[in-house]
Image (cartoon, grey):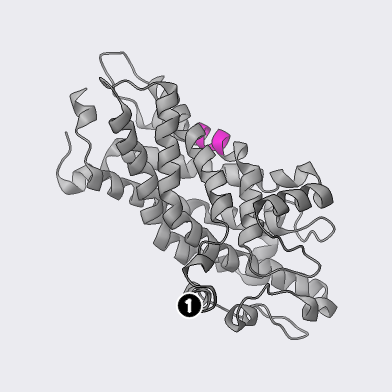
Amino acid sequence: MAQQQQISLPAKLINGGIAGMVGVTCVFPIDLAKTRLQNQRSGQQLYKNMMDCLIKTVKSEGYFGMYRGAAVNLTLVTPEKAIKLAANDFFRQQLSKDGRLTVFKEMLAGCCAGMCQVIITTPMEMLKIQLQDAGRLAAQQRGVPSVVSALKMGGTSAVLSRSYNTSPAPQIMRVSATQITRELLRTKGVKGLYRGLGATLMRDIPFSVVYFPLFAHLHHLGRHSPEDPAVPFYWSFMSGCLAGCIAAVTVSPFDVVKTRLQSLKKGANEETYNGVVDCFRKILRKEGPGAFLKGAICRALVIAPLFGIAQVVYVVGVGEYLLGCTP
């Protein structure tokens, strides 16, 4: 158990950051499709499924349209993934006795990790969603040009409005994450960046509670023998993918609610929400239970490789190698 106690927090932070950047680069287009599918309402469906969304995005916005919001995600995913993964390792170590953890303590460690990460996750998701959803709103305006004047801003600023206001032949005007951040800070203060914090907690805490214990047990099955704790990297990847997939689908309803609450700009005739409970009620009443699983497949396809890659980076020990503290 000596190796288990030699946890280098800086190395874990580096591992988490690298894993986040590599993973996001690989799966970001699917994440964009997930956001657009979750935000479209019944009766106003622009996209039939993930592939239809990606094809239409490329046709109307070009190849790089699939990476709208990627810059802010790549910038903030490093601290977000680093905090999440390193915090879980830290709390597992603190809660372990003689290197052993009960399932309850594993879940508690995951819960604490999920609570820590929302400091970065909430503003990151807030900014990313505005940039990802801009193309869907512009496409909706092109389909129904007469409703441009009816679009709602929910009290947001002129900079946010300019990204969606269009002429009879709508074009997507570029707005950066920096512009959105400045306007939110000016009009709403820091709390503007943390809109949807409750829904983010409701998503990320259960996710971590499910993911980390499940991964630990799946990973343990890959050991050659009790005397040899080494696990092949491909087993780590598969364990991370499977655990991430199950956890992602489990919390998908909370992700739908979070996405709806954090979308500042609404399309024509789209509902506005006054908090988590109001959002749940309106979605259930107007769109039915199936709406809570919108984008669930996309989210599973995003999270599975993202956490699979993260666990491989941990196994390889890139952070430990860079800091010269490899056992």
Locate residue 146, reporting x and y percent.
85, 79
Q: Quadrant of the C terminus?
A: top left
Which residue is located at x 71 percent, y 53 percent? 279
Please, what is the three-letter code of the amino acid marked with disc 1?
Arg
**Label 1: few (<14), some or many (≥20) within 10 Å?**
few
Determine if the magenta segment contains residue 175: no
Left or right relative to 222: residue 174 = right
Residue sitting farthest toward the left: 324
> Looking at this view, is 190 or 165 the one in front?
190
Left or right relative to 260: residue 15 = left
Mark 1 element type: helix
- Compared to residue 160, the image places residue 132 above or below, namely above
Residue 174 in which image quadrant: bottom right
Locate residue 291, reporting x and y percent.
75, 47
- Compared to residue 116, the image places residue 46 above or below, namely below
- In the picture of the structure, the residue carrying the numbered disc 1 is 182
The magenta-colored residue range is 242-247
Locate residue 262, reporting x and y percent.
61, 61
Left or right relative to 74: residue 99 = left
Which residue is located at x 23 percent, y 36 percent? 7
Count numbered badges in the picture.
1
Left or right relative to 45: residue 211 = left
